Image (cartoon, helix red, strand yellow):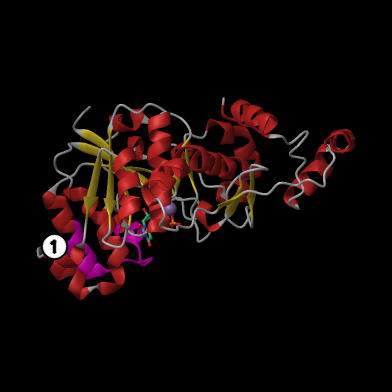
Amino acid sequence: MADQAFVTLATNDSYAKGAMVLGQSLKNHKTSRKLVVMIGPHVSDPSRAVLRRIYDEVRLVDVLDSGDSANLAMLKRPDLGVTFTKLHCWTLTHYSKCVFMDADTLVVSNVDELFDREELSAAPDPGWPDCFNSGVFVFRPSKETHGKLLQFCTEHGSFDGGDQGVLNAYFGDWATTDISKHLPFIYNLSSVALYTYAPAFKQFGSKAKVVHFLGSMKPWSLTFDTTARRVQGDVEGASSHPSFMLEWWLLFATSVLPMMKQEYGDTPFHSGCESSVHLSISQGEDISGAASLSSLERKHKWEQGQADYMGMDSFDNIQKKLDSFLK
Ligand code: UDP
Ligand code: MN
């Protein structure tokens, strides 16, 4: 087990927050594997300190300083910067097998069984299911594969400009050769599926093991009201189920933020958390008022940001709902 690891990547402090939550979620679900985060030089010292508290290994990767084949490849294709950085996971040869997870993923159940799979195992992309989504994949670190990937990248570029295009072209037989390399969708569930195939999401969504907040809106692009325990902003635009988004923020606010406060000390940082105390609401009235709302009306109110958080939508009730949803 000591030679197997979950690996993620954060090139800046925003993605570092995602990595903190991901790492903490893996620990909360009692993984027996090592945790590795690859960071870029722009990640600040206090963020590195927090990552060191969560991860077994915090490894600085900088393609421009590496002076090896990566450096050469990078000089030829500067547009593929972050892509090259992700491919560096193949250099972690002190592990025999790894699972890469994007920093915008969240583990909602133990997923150690992923290590039973072989390279390259991944789940279908919701947008083009003949391609795999590169947010979660099983791989075997190897200098040789790393070199070949960089060479492939330099010669052919990436059809989508990112790592997913390169990896799908390189592991081009994924769709057709070996079904055991198709991870079930619940190992990389994005709520794009919620909109494109709602009945399936209703049927299988509760079995989710890994949630992926893919797209330009990330959990950390939103803000969280710690008093109301409510995510604020365009939750739907973040293409995520509200309960998963809430789970990300609860984990951030309760486990990660205290560590950040300690490590940042007097240095200001953007937590995305704010506390609002709504004194205007009379608790008694609110509960009786909300109780008479139909569930559809409640849903609309919720979506308009008017959750009845002192009554029916109180944190205790949300937690119960989350627990039953995830059971
Ligand atoms: N990433 C990063 N810095 C960036 C962009 C991406 O560290 O500026 C890493 C991070 O691990 C992220 C992954 O690359 O999860 C893939 O990018 P992203 O998740 O934004 O792509 P999406 O899943 O939305 O297609
Ligand atoms: Mn992602």
Q: Is residue 325 left or right of residue 15?
A: right
Q: How many marks?
A: 1
Q: Is residue 132 left or right of residue 222?
A: left
Figure check: 173 above or below 208: below
Specify the quadrant of the image occupied by residue 13: bottom left
Q: In front here: 253 or 261?
A: 261
Q: Residue at x 19, y 63 (%)?
A: 63
Figure check: 219 above or below 292: below
**Mainly helix, strand or loop, the magenta region?**
helix
In the picture as drawn, the residue positioned furthest to the left comes out as: 68
Q: Position of residue 262 (x, y in %)?
A: 40, 44
Q: Residue at x 10, y 65 (%)?
A: 67
Q: Position of residue 36 (x, y in %)?
A: 27, 42
* Span shown in magenta: 149-166
Q: Is residue 11 magenta?
A: no
Answer few, some or many: residues within 10 Å of disc 1's Cα (few below 14, many 20 plus, some between 14 and 19). few
Residue kind at label 1, given as amino acid type? Ser
Q: The N terminus lies in which quarter of the figure?
A: top left
Q: Is residue 153 magenta?
A: yes
Q: Would you say residue 188 is visible in this rendering? A: no
Q: Position of residue 47 (x, y in %)?
A: 35, 52
Q: Position of residue 302 (x, y in %)?
A: 75, 46
For disc 1, the marked residue is 66
